[in-house]
């Protein structure tokens, strides 16, 4: 056996090995790649075939990182072993057995829009995909019916202008997501390592000050994603937003890609008019906004540009460290110019750049335009912003709102990133009737400035990552301020988030709270928060600074009261809360807010 094989023997063995590999690949070595290498003890590994098909870009990126000596995280290995879309039939069998998807199957089922939220709750949460946050009243009613039949009888509006339902048992998860498809909606790719819900200006098409109606662009990108498997299974989640410069901010600067409608002036060397300005790398949970690239994009090229950016990210994003697997970190490592050059190669043309002085200032958003009655660009029509208690609606309330939209409005229900909704197309003569109908179902069209700017993530009631009951304590804060009659005459955004994933974006709030376990003795802790101040967005973008740590949740209402009273007493004229806190050092703020011993 020490002699070399003859040429005939070598050809025979090569054919035998190839046949075994082909059989293994065809029988279910599932996943992005399919097939497993074969070789006996001591045998040289067979040459791997070049990956092909829509998953090839991901397989090549994984292989390149392994070749560079990096170790893929379990989620990457799971995607390679079995693409989550290919797991649907098996996940459906689990549902038929009334069993939840656990461990890596929990990761895979998120590609289908279901999230197991144990141990907080032994149930699924389902998150939808609603491009630009706008759906028809009959679809809204359909979600209510599904949520009543298969979920907990309520939904939440999220901070990505989306809907999610909770308390879905193991057997009902698949019927819920299949029911969404029956009413023209989907949850596909709404979680895990995918491009998330596409956001846009909530008043698109009805806003008097908008530069661009974002609806067709959000819709085109939405369908582009849904119909290209290569755009699933990214190194980590990815957010894209279109802001048409309307009165309600879309918070596009908190996204990986932000398309900002701008007016390019004469003398820029390009056709004057409305373009997209391209901003990249927003991830405020990691203390960064999307930064202006100096690039402007023709309106009709946005989807091609977004596609090219995502493909460069797929090929270059970190698949060995989940904490660094976002676009921001590619930009930090490469620099913007190298990244943009790679995007140009993928899309096949060079970017257009203009200097800031050739771009007109964008219209400012109105921090209260998502609440109450506001005139549309169409004469005699209005949008009506409905206050939802931290985004929550019962199914009965949803059906009633759908009825109001169809009877008195244009049939659209518009969700916002501020966890509320708008009913558009309401005639002047019907405004009072609509407001009364909304009041009759226990909701409102007006709120104090504190309540109007209050945002909270799911919190420890329904999320295993959260350290505190964000919605519960946020509600206590707003109720306390309203009950004591503390009149705050300027908009104040309070963002309450449960963990460092920062779904409620605490760093951009005037006041931002992040959940923490607060020690009360050497052994015990209670739910509480660290408090930040001075955050902002848009032209006022800033990352909030930490003011005080380890405030017990029950003490937060009194602490926020002190902060607001200190601001009102010491501000300079009509100075905003954010501006006030930014011009003082943290020590001085603690003194002004009487928090030295808090």
Image (spheres, rainbow, N blue to C red):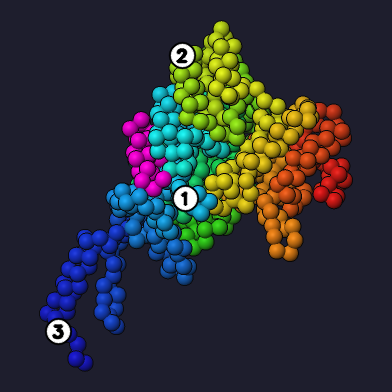
The residue under label 3 is: 6
Please indicate whether residue 410 sits to the left or right of residue 379 in the image.
left
Q: CA distance from mark 2 to mark 1?
A: 39 Å
Please indicate whether residue 521 sits to the left or right of residue 588 in the image.
left
Label 1's element?
A: loop
Residue 146: x and y in percent read 40, 34
Residue at image point 49% right, 63% down: 320
Residue 113: x and y in percent read 42, 44
Residue 369: x and y in percent read 63, 24
Magenta span dominant secondary structure? helix
Does 180 appear in magenta?
yes
Label 2's element?
A: helix
Residue at image point 49% right, 46% down: 238
The residue under label 1 is: 122
Residue at image point 75% right, 30% down: 483
Please indicate whether residue 490 sits to the left or right of residue 103 in the image.
right
Magenta region, residue range: 169-187
The mark lying in front, picked from 1 and 3, is 1
Crowd band around label 2 with a 10 angstrom C-alpha radius: few (<14), some (14–19), many (20+):
few
The residue under label 2 is: 407
Give the tally of numbered discs. Answer: 3
């Amino acid at each position: 056996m020490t002699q070399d094989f003859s040429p005939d023997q070598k050809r025979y063995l090569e054919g035998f090995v190839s046949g075994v590999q082909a059989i293994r690949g065809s029988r279910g070595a599932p996943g992005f790649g399919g097939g497993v290498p074969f070789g006996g003890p001591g045998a040289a590994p067979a040459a791997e075939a070049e990956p092909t098909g829509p998953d090839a870009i991901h397989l090549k990126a994984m292989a390149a990182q392994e070749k560079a000596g990096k170790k893929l995280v379990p989620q990457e290995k799971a995607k390679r072993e079995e693409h989550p879309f290919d797991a649907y039939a098996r996940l459906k069998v689990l549902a038929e057995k009334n069993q939840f998807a656990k461990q890596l199957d929990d990761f895979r089922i998120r590609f289908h829009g279901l999230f197991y939220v144990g141990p907080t709750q032994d149930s699924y949460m389902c998150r939808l995909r609603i491009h630009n946050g706008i759906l028809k009243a009959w679809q809204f009613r359909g979600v209510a019916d599904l949520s009543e039949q298969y979920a907990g009888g309520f939904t939440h509006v999220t901070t990505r202008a989306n809907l999610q339902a909770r308390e879905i048992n193991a057997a009902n998860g698949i019927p819920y997501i299949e029911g969404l498809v029956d009413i023209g909606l989907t949850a596909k790719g709404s979680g895990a390592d995918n491009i998330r819900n596409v956001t846009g200006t909530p008043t698109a098409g009805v806003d008097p000050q908008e530069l661009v109606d974002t609806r067709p662009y959000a819709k085109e990108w939405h369908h582009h994603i849904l119909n290209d498997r290569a755009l699933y299974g990214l190194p980590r989640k990815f957010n894209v937003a279109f802001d048409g410069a309307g009165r309600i901010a879309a918070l596009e600067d908190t996204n990986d890609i932000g398309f900002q409608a701008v007016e390019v002036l004469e003398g820029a060397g390009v056709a004057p008019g409305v373009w997209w300005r391209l901003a990249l790398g927003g991830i405020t949970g990691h203390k960064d906004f999307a930064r202006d690239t100096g690039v402007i994009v023709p309106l009709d090229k946005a989807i091609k540009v977004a596609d090219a950016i995502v493909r460069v990210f797929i090929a270059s994003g970190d698949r060995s460290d989940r904490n660094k697997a976002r676009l921001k970190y590619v930009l930090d490592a490469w620099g913007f110019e190298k990244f943009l050059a790679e995007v140009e190669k993928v899309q096949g043309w060079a970017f257009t750049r203009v200097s800031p002085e050739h771009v007109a200032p964008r219209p400012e958003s109105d921090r209260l335009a998502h609440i109450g009655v506001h005139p549309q660009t169409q004469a005699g029509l209005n949008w009506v912003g409905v206050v939802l208690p931290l985004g929550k609606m019962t199914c009965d309330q949803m059906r009633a709102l759908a009825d109001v939209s169809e009877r008195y409005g244009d049939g659209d229900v518009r969700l916002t990133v501020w966890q509320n909704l708008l009913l558009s197309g309401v005639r002047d003569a019907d405004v009072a009737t609509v407001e009364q109908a909304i009041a009759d179902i226990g909701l409102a069209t007006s709120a104090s400035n504190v309540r109007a700017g209050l945002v909270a993530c799911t919190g420890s009631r329904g999320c295993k990552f959260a350290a505190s009951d964000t919605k519960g304590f946020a509600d206590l804060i707003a109720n306390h301020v309203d009950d004591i009659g503390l009149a705050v005459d300027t908009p104040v955004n309070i963002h309450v988030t449960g963990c460092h994933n920062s779904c409620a974006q605490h760093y951009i709030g005037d006041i931002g709270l992040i959940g923490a376990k607060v020690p009360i003795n050497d052994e015990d802790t209670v739910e509480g928060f660290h408090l930040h101040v001075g955050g902002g967005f848009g032209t006022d973008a800033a990352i909030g600074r930490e003011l005080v740590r380890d405030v017990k949740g029950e003490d937060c209402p009194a602490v926020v009261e002190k902060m607001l009273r200190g601001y009102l007493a010491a501000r300079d004229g009509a100075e905003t809360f954010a501006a006030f806190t930014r011009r003082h050092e943290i020590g001085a703020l603690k003194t002004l807010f009487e928090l030295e011993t808090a």
